[in-house]
Image (cartoon, coloured by chain):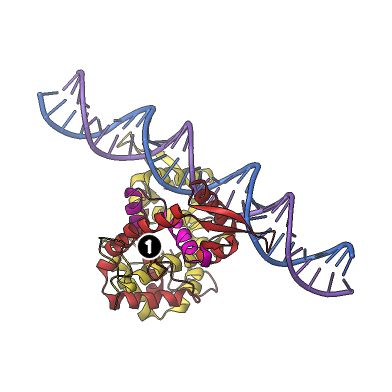
Chain colours: A yellow, B red, C blue, D purple
DNA sequence: TCAAGAATGATGCAAGTGCATATATGGCGG
DNA sequence: CCGCCATATATGCACTTGCATCATTCTTGA
């Protein structure tokens, strides 16, 4: 199983070799797959994935607008990161900042038509990339199994499906 | 609007909902787990994980030295990234650049005693973090299963085990 | 033997990220 | 109504990353 005197310099519990191997794979494979997908998008002339995620959240929101703080929670990125991502979307005319009369501290970010259009066009390339780098390498059953194993790592891996404008899975 | 199950902008194949879900989990969970582990290391006063990886590769190499190009292949990071990582290790006295007489274009990077020491001390915190964030959440069998599923995504996920100082020579 | 091209490593610059903090407003207890 | 703290967003600054390119040295083939 595991040779106790080989590892662990001193006190804390040691991970099994299986756990360690899983950790390594998790880091390396996701880095590789993410890189491949981002690369595909870039080669197709599209902006980074984060832009897609934001545009999708906005497009799905009622009225096509969200408070930055909501966006931040959906995307699980730091506050300042959200602020600057919005900067870029606005600069490119993909979204607009609107006043929030309910709470003068905040504001609304509203997706523009150009933004909706880009989101749709990106999904075409994005979905193809997912299929190429993930779907084509795993049966649906294996993909589901992978999901459930990964879910166990992120105690709470809830959250909206950051994917297609699809509908709640009919299953 | 558009239903991804029927629309599919034209020609590309669309990923199954299972594949898409797996993709999302892969991105989110690794981000979360990596963040947690890096955070643990930082809180323990250690440098980033990349430093550990580099130090381990150097420590395991015969003579404690490697060519940057070798390090680069082991760690799967870009060339300029390797160059700068070495800069920092050298600045901190954890490694040293040595002339390479065989090939004047290149050089050798040799780990110092301080470097070996840091690597060992980091493993203590690192292994504890892996156990806390991965090992404790998965049975060995599940971890192995996760490994094999991930491996299928990275067509070629070979390479040295970037992990414990374990089997290395006792000094 | 030499020119052309590949390999190795470093670096200038633009862009992105993390961290701390600034700014403005909302809410609450007194 | 006021002082105080919490919330929402922005930003200055240092550091890191990606990209392109440079300088040097090696290799190869005519």
Whether residue A133 appears in this view of the structure is: yes
| Magenta-drawn stretch contains A93 | no
Q: Quadrant of residue D4?
A: top left
Residue at 44% over, 78% down:
B152
Q: Tell me: B107 left or right of B43.
A: right
As drawn, which residue projects farthest toward the front? B171
* In the image, residue D14 above or below residue A39: above
Front-most of A80 and B51?
A: B51
Identify the residue position indicated by label 1 in the image.
Answer: B30
* In the image, residue D3 above or below residue B2: above
Locate residue B2, reporting x and y percent. 44, 66
| Numbered range of the magenta stretch | B35-63
Front-most of B97 and A17?
A: B97
Whether residue A158 appears in this view of the structure is: no
Q: Quadrant of the C terminus of chain A?
A: bottom left
Front-most of A74 and A94?
A: A74
Locate residue A84, reporting x and y percent. 45, 43
């Amino acid at each position: 199983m595991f040779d106790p005197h080989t590892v662990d310099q001193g006190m804390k519990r040691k991970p099994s070799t299986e756990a360690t191997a899983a950790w390594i794979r998790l880091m390396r494979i996701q880095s590789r797959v993410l890189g491949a997908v981002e690369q595909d998008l870039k080669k197709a002339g599209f902006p980074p994935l984060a832009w897609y995620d934001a545009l999708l959240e906005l497009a799905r929101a009622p009225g096509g607008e969200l408070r930055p703080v909501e966006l931040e929670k959906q995307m699980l990125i730091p506050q300042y990161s959200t602020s600057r991502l919005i900067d870029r979307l606005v600069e490119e005319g993909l979204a607009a900042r609107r006043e929030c009369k309910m709470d003068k501290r905040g504001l609304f970010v509203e997706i523009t038509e150009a933004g909706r259009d880009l989101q749709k066009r990106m999904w075409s390339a994005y979905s193809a990339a997912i299929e190429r780098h993930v779907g084509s390498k795993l049966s649906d059953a294996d993909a589901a199994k992978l999901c459930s194993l990964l879910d166990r790592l992120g105690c709470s891996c809830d959250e909206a499906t950051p994917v297609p404008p699809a509908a709640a899975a009919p299953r």
